């Protein structure tokens, strides 16, 4: 009799990292650490366009504005120019790919062909609503596995 093996494809995953407490007022560095902390960036990753995309979304959420993809591209390029950063990675396909990552992470949503931070939440509320909830759901499932192991 053969046992059926469960697929080893996760239903959900979350990478979280702990860094030192924030000790700077450099907004880009704070957003970078946020991205690193929740797994949107890997340590040492040179492709950091997601930082600037998220920066645009955070700023526009404060103004309760949603953006088309073209507006997002222009805003992202503007930020990178102000910081004297390369516009490499600002192509439409790459921006769309990064927005999809943010959307899949539950941080960004699309409404009427415009994108915005989920429900215009603050970054703290967004973290509570999306990241903490996802972490709690994953931990709950891990605990079910632990209980099943203990019951064998």
Image (cartoon, grey):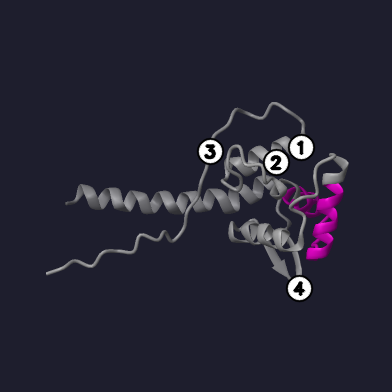
Can you tell which mark lies on residue 112?
A: 4
> Contact (CB < 8 A) between labels 2 and 1?
yes
* Mark 1 and mark 4: Cα distance apart in space: 29 Å
| Mark closer to the chain start, 2 or 4 | 2
Q: Quadrant of residue 43?
A: top right
Residue at the location (41% across, 48% down)? 139
> Contact (CB < 8 A) between labels 3 and 4?
no
Packing grade of label 2 (10 A; few <14, some 14-19, many >=20) is some
Q: Position of residue 121 (x, y in %)?
A: 70, 53
Label 2 element class:
helix
Give the prevailing secondary structure in the magenta stretch.
helix
Residue at the location (71% across, 63% down)? 93
| Mark closer to the chain start, 2 or 3 | 3
Is residue 74 covered in magenta?
Answer: yes
| In the image, residue 152 above or below residue 67 | above
* Mark 1 and mark 3: Cα distance apart in space: 19 Å
Q: Which residue bears the numbered disc 3?
A: 17
Q: Magenta stretch: give its range.
A: 53-79
Label 3 element class:
loop
| In the image, residue 62 above or below residue 1 | above
Residue at the location (59% across, 61% down)? 104
Q: Which residue bears the numbered disc 2?
A: 31
Q: State left or right for residue 33 relative to residue 8.
A: right
| In the image, residue 52 above or below residue 98 | above
Packing grade of label 1 (10 A; few <14, some 14-19, many >=20) is few
Residue at the location (80% across, 51% down)? 62
| Mark closer to the chain start, 3 or 4 | 3
| Mark closer to the chain start, 1 or 4 | 1
Q: Quadrant of residue 98?
A: bottom right
């Amino acid at each position: 009799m053969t046992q059926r093996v469960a697929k080893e494809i996760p239903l959900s995953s979350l990478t979280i990292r702990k860094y030192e407490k924030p000790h700077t007022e450099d907004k880009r560095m704070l957003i970078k650490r946020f991205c690193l902390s929740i797994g949107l960036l890997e340590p040492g990753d040179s492709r950091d366009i997601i930082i600037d995309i998220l920066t645009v979304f955070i700023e526009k959420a404060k103004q309760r504005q949603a953006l088309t993809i073209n507006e997002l591209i222009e805003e992202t390029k503007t930020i990178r120019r102000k910081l004297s950063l390369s516009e490499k990675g600002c192509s439409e396909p790459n921006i769309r790919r990064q927005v999809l990552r943010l959307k899949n992470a539950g941080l960004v949503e699309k409404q009427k062909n415009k994108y915005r931070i989920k429900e215009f939440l603050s970054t703290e509320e967004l973290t509570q609503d999306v990241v903490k909830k996802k972490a709690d759901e994953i931990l709950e499932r891990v605990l079910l596995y632990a209980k099943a192991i203990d019951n064998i």
